[in-house]
Amino acid sequence: MSVAVITDSAAALPDSLASVNGITVVPMWLTIADQAVREGERTLGELIGDERVTTSGPTPGEFEEAIRSRLAEPGVDDVLVCTIAASMSSTYEAAAVAAREVGDRVSVIDTTTAAGAEALVVLEAARVATEGRSLDVVEAAARRVIERVRLIATLPTLDHLVRGGRVPSIAGWAGRHLSINPLFEFSGGGVKRLRPALSAEAAHDRIVAACLRSRPDDAAALHVVALHALAREVAEHLLGGVEADVQPATSFVEEFGSVMVVHTGPGLAGLAWWWESPADQASSAI
């Protein structure tokens, strides 16, 4: 028995990791002045600052095509689809519609998160799937990560969010004049504002500290992704801060997906992580 894993491009999963882990990635969509392009076809540098850009998720037909393609592969019996948070996109519903068309060999789960946090959920599902586990066990592994994964990020300025109408202009003014660096946590399908930092360095230190401080006493391994939007050096600095204290089992640096960044602007940087326990390892071996 074999389970194939599918996700959307909001997971910000590097092509190399998707390929080596047998993960199918269905692209999100960007519309630029009435021209539709798949996420990844334009660089972040081309997109940021273009106020004509709107975003949307894959269609049910695109998910159905991906699901049927995987089920047609020799040895594949079932498919697990892991999507960006349903509260952030219509992607989950599109995948659910596709799954109903295909039948009971498909399960769709809402990761309740995005970007590197979504990628970590997908990678764990794929890891357990390669061990030949059943669909129920692969799905349970993904849900364990959903319960544990965290994603905290910071922005150098609120200006882009102000222009998009997502925060009041007074907040942007205060941020600029007080040198405030906002911090956010993406969890449970929503965005939670954390206490802002008074400098970029302080914001970065707090993100690294949050990751290390969340380590359980019985932690067996750390899985972490450093994410950025045209700020790779910042992401590498964040990952280096973590690796100075612990050697992760999984770690990589990747850009936030353009679907997210067109709403937040450049400079977005953060960490997504989850701590694996011996109990997690035992559960996936059932």
Image (tube, rainbow, N blue to C red):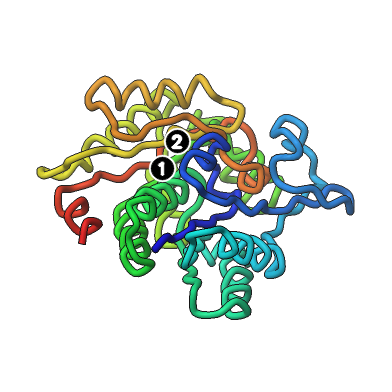
Q: Residue 191: x percent and y percent?
A: 47, 55
Query: What kind of element bears circle 1?
Result: strand
The residue depicted at 69 percent of the width and 40 percent of the height is: 40
In the image: residue 218, left or right of residue 136: left
On the image, numbered disc 1 is attached to which residue?
A: 152
Q: Is residue 167 visible?
A: no
Residue density around tag 1, few if under 14, some if 14–19, many if 20 or more, within 10 Å: many
Query: What kind of element bears circle 2?
Result: strand
- Quadrant of the frame with the C terminus: bottom left
Residue density around tag 2, few if under 14, some if 14–19, many if 20 or more, within 10 Å: many
- What number is the disc on residue 270? 2
Q: Residue furthest left?
A: 217
The residue depicted at 46 percent of the width and 43 percent of the height is: 21
Q: Earlier in the sequence, mark 1 or mark 2?
A: 1
- The answer to whether marks 1 and 2 mark residues whose Cβ atoms lie closer than 8 Å is yes
Q: CA distance from mark 1 to mark 2?
A: 6 Å
The residue depicted at 46 percent of the width and 51 percent of the height is: 118
In the image: residue 50, left or right of residue 128: right
Q: Nearer the viewer, residue 55 or 276?
A: 276
Q: Is residue 77 above or below residue 29?
A: below
Q: Residue 240: x percent and y percent?
A: 35, 21
Q: Residue furthest right?
A: 34
Q: Is residue 219 visible?
A: yes
- What number is the disc on residue 125? none
In the image: residue 162, left or right of residue 248: right
